[in-house]
Image (cartoon, rainbow, N blue to C red):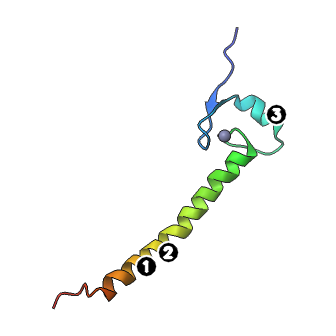
Amino acid sequence: MAVPPKAVCPTCSKNFDPVKARAASSTSLGPFCSPRCRQVDLGKWLNEEYRVPVEDDSTEEGRSSEGGEPS
Ligand SMILES: [Zn+2]
């Protein structure tokens, strides 16, 4: 008997059958168990991309306004 293919979803860390997941969805899911998990991962990346420049900017501003320049 063949062992059914197993994969772990990077979003929800759930074991799933990629063949079944692919058959259930008409779109490519990649390594994810469902379109929702795929969306969640995409959103995560987008959020981090948005957060990085914002955090960087406020940190820089706080530093210079605190008088970080030694005389
Ligand atoms: Zn998942």
Q: Nearer the viewer, residue 30 or 33?
A: 33
- Whichever of callouts 3 and 2 sits on the residue coming sooner in the sequence is 3
Kind of residue at disc 3: Ala
Q: Is residue 16 left or right of residue 58?
A: right
Residue 46, given in percent of the width and then of the height, sits at 60, 63
Residue 32 appears in view: no
Is residue 64 found left or right of 40 in the rendered image? Answer: left
User: Would residue 64 appear left or right of 14 to someone viewing this image?
Assistant: left
Q: Is residue 29 above or below residue 39?
A: above
Coordinates of residue 39 in the picture (x, y in percent): 70, 52
Residue 13 left/right relative to 16? left
* Label 1 SS: helix
Q: Residue at x 73, y 48 (%)?
A: 36
Q: Position of residue 68 (x, y in %)?
A: 25, 84
Q: Which residue is mark 2?
A: 54
Which mark, residue 58? 1
**Vertical placement of 30 versus 45: above or below?**
above
Identify the residue position indicated by label 3 in the image. 23
x%, y% of residue 64? 32, 86
Q: Does the beta carbon at disc 3 come under 8 Å from ligand 1?
A: no
